[in-house]
Amino acid sequence: VRFGDSLDGDLVRRDFTVNAMAVRITPDGPGEFLDPLGGLTALRAGVLDTPAAPETSFGDDPLRMLRAARFVAQLGFTVAPRVHTAIVDMAAQLDRITAERVGAELDKLLLGADPVAGIDLMVQTGLGEVVLPEVGGMRMAIDEHHQHKDVYQHSLTVLRQAIALEDPPPEGGPDLVLRWAALLHDIGKPATRRHESDGGVSFHHHEVVGAKMVRKRMRALRYSKQMIND
């Protein structure tokens, strides 16, 4: 850790420009609004961009790439093109981050207003291959009813439907266990897919295989035994 000596130097080390604004506090209260990196413009546009070159920002802390997906899910933002490109190029560096920090970001993403958007960004950029490869692995495994493009899209639909069934606040609210279960309920299908003689597709015992895969992945992410059982 090296301590800086300027506000600009501090702000450029934040994760995104929307988090790199400041207000000077005076004895009389809030004073000058300081936004040297265009954070307010990015906030109004709903765009996530990095204060420094994304390669520099993500090199400092690769978890910021996953945080971008989380902000997409929570806030409805999009990522700037250069940020998207950098995530694709640097996704493998997420391996440097502890499982506990990754799990915390995934929970926040799933509890967001639109977790499907965040998950899809993860899968499309390669982040999912690092932290949740089973989800992206469902792509192009056609479901037996042919009602959805593939098992991946089917699982995202189930997640949306599960969210729609949640009880509203204040008594209810986002249900983390329900959302995890909805997302992962079919991850055993690619491993059990079989093409039948009549032209159909079957996934016999995918629920058994999938349950084992869920336990293995959630243990790797350091979730509690109670959470995994739930």
Image (tube, rainbow, N blue to C red):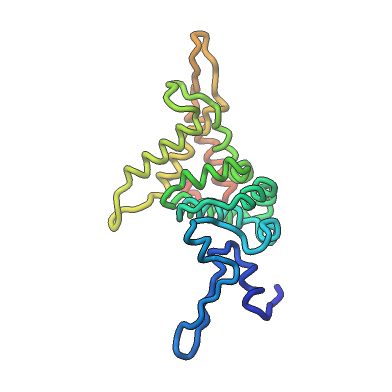
Quadrant location of the N terminus in the rendered image = bottom right
Location of residue 107 in the rendering, given as x and y in whole percent from the top left corner: 49, 52
Q: Residue at x 71, y 75 (%)?
A: 2
Q: Residue at x 52, y 33 (%)?
A: 187
Residue situated in front as seen by the camera: 157 or 216: 157
> Is residue 107 in view from this perspective?
no
Residue situated in front as seen by the camera: 56 or 45: 45
Location of residue 96 in the rendering, given as x and y in whole percent from the top left corner: 69, 54
> Is the residue 83 above or below the residue 31 in the image?
above
> Is the residue 21 above or below the residue 122 in the image?
below
Q: Residue at x 48, y 14 (%)?
A: 200
> Is residue 120 in view from this perspective?
yes
Residue at the bottom extreme of this rendering? 27
Residue situated in front as seen by the camera: 93 or 177: 93
> Is the residue 66 above or below the residue 148 in the image?
below
Residue situated in front as seen by the camera: 189 or 42: 42
Quadrant location of the C terminus in the rendered image = top left
Q: Is residue 143 found left or right of 59 in the rendered image?
A: left
Location of residue 145 in the rendering, given as x and y in whole percent from the top left corner: 42, 21
Q: Residue at x 62, y 52 (%)?
A: 83
Location of residue 19 in the rendering, given as x and y in whole percent from the top left corner: 54, 66
